[in-house]
Amino acid sequence: AGVHRPVFSSPKGRVARPRHSPTGHLLFQMEGGVWAVPFSLSSLSTTGDPVLVSTNARQPAIADDGTIVMLSGTASSALALTEVDATGKPGAVIGTNRGVWPRLSPDGRFVAAMVGFGSDTDIWIFDRTRKTERRLTFEPTADVNPSWSPDGQSIVYTCATSVCARPADGRSEEHTSE
């Protein structure tokens, strides 16, 4: 049985939503911004100091190619799914619907995100290349916490008290594991 050990602690505040980047960094949310710290997978330790990637941002998502998408804005403003370049500069806003909990497909082309509130929350797919968006789920209960399969062909998510999966292209029925 393994024992967990902290790999990064901050005296500045709570660290949330860590994501490993193929660039050799951990991205995380802290103090109303997204930060990055160099990270070694072989030693499971940080190898430098954290740097601020983007202010007024949260929920970073990273594709296999290093593409980063996050929510930009503050709690008092409308949050927007936003692309971020390698320097941390916010770029294009993705979609017109207000999505949260963004997850990039492994190839970085699509973003799966939650749209809606309460039991009216569904998973939407945003195509970054074609600049389109479409609703993926239509259950009468909340569909939340999307995650891509490693091949990018399916989305796994929480639906009511079950874990559900459906093809990311939306062409066939969902599969449920209770």
Image: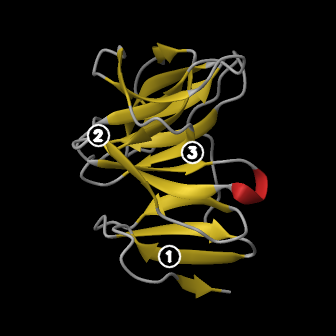
Which element carries disc 2, helix, strand or loop? Answer: loop
Estimate the x, y position of residue 115 in percent, counting from the top left.
Answer: 59, 48
Estimate the x, y position of residue 151 in percent, counting from the top left.
Answer: 28, 68
Q: Looking at the image, which is closer to me, 131 or 90?
A: 131
Circle 1 packing at 10 Å, graded few (<14), some (14-19), many (20+), is: many
What's the image's color scheme?
Answer: secondary structure
Mark 2 or mark 1: whose residue is earlier in sequence: 2
Tell me if 150 is positioned left or right of 143 in this view. left
Tell me if 47 is positioned left or right of 67 in this view. right
Which element carries disc 1, helix, strand or loop? Answer: strand
Distance CA(mark 3)–CA(mark 2):
19 Å
Q: Is residue 68 above or below residue 11?
A: below
Question: Which residue shows up at 45% across the image and 44% down it?
Answer: 44
Q: Is residue 112 above or below residue 150?
A: above
- Camera-near label (3 vs 2) is 2
Distance CA(mark 1)–CA(mark 3):
17 Å
Question: Which residue shows up at 45% across the image and 75% down it?
Answer: 166
The residue singled out by tag 1 in the image is 165
Estimate the x, y position of residue 72 in percent, counting from the top left.
Answer: 52, 23
Q: Amino acid at mark 2?
A: Lys
Estimate the x, y position of residue 29 in percent, counting from the top left.
Answer: 58, 29
- Camera-near label (2 vs 1) is 2
Q: Amino acid at mark 1?
A: Ala
**Image mark for residue 24:** none
Q: Looking at the image, which is closer to me, 113 or 84?
A: 113
Question: Which residue shows up at 52% across the image and 39% down it?
Answer: 97
Discs 1, 3 touching: Cβ within 8 Å: no
Mark 1 or mark 3: whose residue is earlier in sequence: 3
Q: Amino acid at mark 3?
A: Trp
Circle 3 packing at 10 Å, graded few (<14), some (14-19), many (20+), is: many
**Image mark for residue 101:** 3
Q: State which quarter of the image contains the N terminus.
A: bottom right
